[in-house]
Image (cartoon, helix red, strand yellow):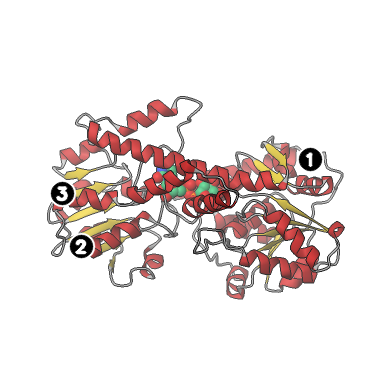
Amino acid sequence: MKKQLCALSLLLILFNAKGIEQSTTSSRYTTNPKITIIGVGYVGLVSGAGLAELGNQVMCTDIDTKKIEMLNTGTIPIYEPGLKEIVDHNVATGRLSFTTNVLQALDAADVIFICVGTPMADNGAADLSYIQSTVEMIARALKSYKVIVTKSTVPTGTGAWIRSLLQAKGIDGASFDVVSNPEFLREGTAVKDFLAPDRIVIGAESERAFEIMNKVYEKMIERDVPLIRTNLVASETIKYASNAFLAIKLSYINEIANLCDETGADAKAVAQGMGLDKRINPYFLNPGPGFGGSCFPKDSRALLYMAQLKGIDLHTVNASLIANETQKKKPFEKLVKILGEDLSNKTIAILGLAFKANTDDIRCSPSITTIELLLKHGAKIQAYDPAANETMRHVFPDITYCRSAYQAAKGTDAIIIMTEWEEFKYLDLAKIGTLTKSRILIDTRNILPINEFKKHNYTFDVIGRRCLSCH
Ligand code: UGA
């Protein structure tokens, strides 16, 4: 964690240094537009702090007054490495503030970023009710020209729908512009992703809106961060198409790893060999227990739903979701191969509950599927996650939560590593083995060296690396 924060500070220093060096602007706007962020969830808070770091004046608001009160006392309501530092820094400079007065915050803004949730509805579509109520609030506050930006992931056509909602309320179409500026933040590295993005995507329908958005991102544009200027629908589509593509890539490598399990090929070597082809690239090729989180499963389903409405079958997207459901059962299936189906007298240690490392988010986490299957087969669970014990307690109040990996392993029949937390990479296999009843370990993230399992006489399984020569 310390290492990560150091890297982040360095990034901030480099970033600021560069921002001061280069102060030319191609925009006719000379002052930075005032920004209001609606919704201080993970997207809103990271974006608000990041936009302030770029030199903008940012006010964040939320209908959840508790969150705003927490922020006003210096408490960050979510777990995200580096976020507190960047929030504190920008509050201290006076560029970032939080208010419960939503209407006042809207009134003061030149640019309004909508960062509210777009959860999945029962039919797989994105539920836009929070967007709708936000737009209705904006309609009440709209007295002068504003740029209204969707930062949340919204289906293609939402920008046009927002425009029609406002116009239906009698608002003159010339008094606002709607812009799509999707976020590409990963939980756990969101601050870094905001400050050093691969690209900025801006979808708009007027030159005025583009110019104002250019000013908002001026410091990044000066650093030559690639900028995609396109129309609203293309920008909205870029976000979904990117997430669904990454989900397909993961399902693909997971299936190849399953094949490796049977053939004896080393999935790590296979991924490396594939990834050196520049057309494939080495990222997102780590096989695991299936993808989770709030984005890939939800966005892939929403994209499928959107396409179906237009009469288009996205077979690849559908297949990646099916493959992922199968993959999420792998950790359990691998355990059953070792211990058998009757787990009624067995206790299993689950190391890692979050859907990935460096977050306390458990939404769609593969750990949930694994724990459900284990409980269904009579097992008892001792779980440990460095950040997500409390969030998981809401889902499984009756399993045992532990304070360390070693405490979780004590007296268990097997250990399953579900999340690639840094601290699990350094597990003392000699020590933890003596704590368990029988040295059985399933590493679903391939984070531990296979030769160490062999050295310490473990019965083990991994994903796609059952080969004898693996190390
Ligand atoms: C994802 C995208 O990566 C972001 O670009 C996007 O902005 C975000 O969704 C969003 O739409 O808000 P996130 O869900 O935070 O970000 O997490 P990722 O790091 O992308 O991981 C997703 C899942 O894939 C996790 O379960 C992770 O463990 C898994 N994964 C990732 C693998 O199994 N193997 C890999 O090589 C990479």
Q: Which comes before the other along the chain, label 3 or label 2?
A: 3
Residue under the image location 60 percent in, 54 percent down: 153
Real-space Cα separation, disc 1 to disc 3, in angstroms = 63 Å
Q: Which comes before the other along the chain, label 2 or label 1?
A: 1
Q: Which mark is residue 377?
A: 2
Residue identifier under label 1: 23
Residue 30 horizontal/vertical position (percent): 85, 47
Residue 293 horizontal/vertical position (percent): 45, 54
Q: Residues within 10 Å of mark 2 (few under 14, many from 20)?
A: some
**Is residue 5 in view from this perspective?**
no
Residue 192 horizontal/vertical position (percent): 56, 46
Residue under the image location 62 percent in, 56 percent down: 152
Q: In the depicted view, which residue is nearer to us: 349 or 14?
A: 349
Real-space Cα separation, disc 2 to disc 1, in angstroms = 63 Å
Q: Give SS at disc 2.
A: loop
**Is residue 376 in view from this perspective?**
yes
Q: Which comes before the other along the chain, label 1 or label 3?
A: 1
Q: Which quadrant is home to the C terminus? A: top left
Q: Can you say whether 274 is above or below 401 in the image?
A: above
Residue 118: quarter of image: bottom right
- Looking at the image, do the residues carrying marks 2 and 1 touch, with CB atoms under 8 Å apart? no
Q: Can you say whether 213 is above or below 368 in the image?
A: above
Residue type highlighted by circle 1: Ser
- Looking at the image, do the residues carrying marks 1 and 3 touch, with CB atoms under 8 Å apart? no
Residue identifier under label 3: 338
Q: In the depicted view, which residue is nearer to us: 120 or 431?
A: 120
244 left or right, relative to 438: right
Q: In the depicted view, which residue is nearer to us: 183 or 75?
A: 183
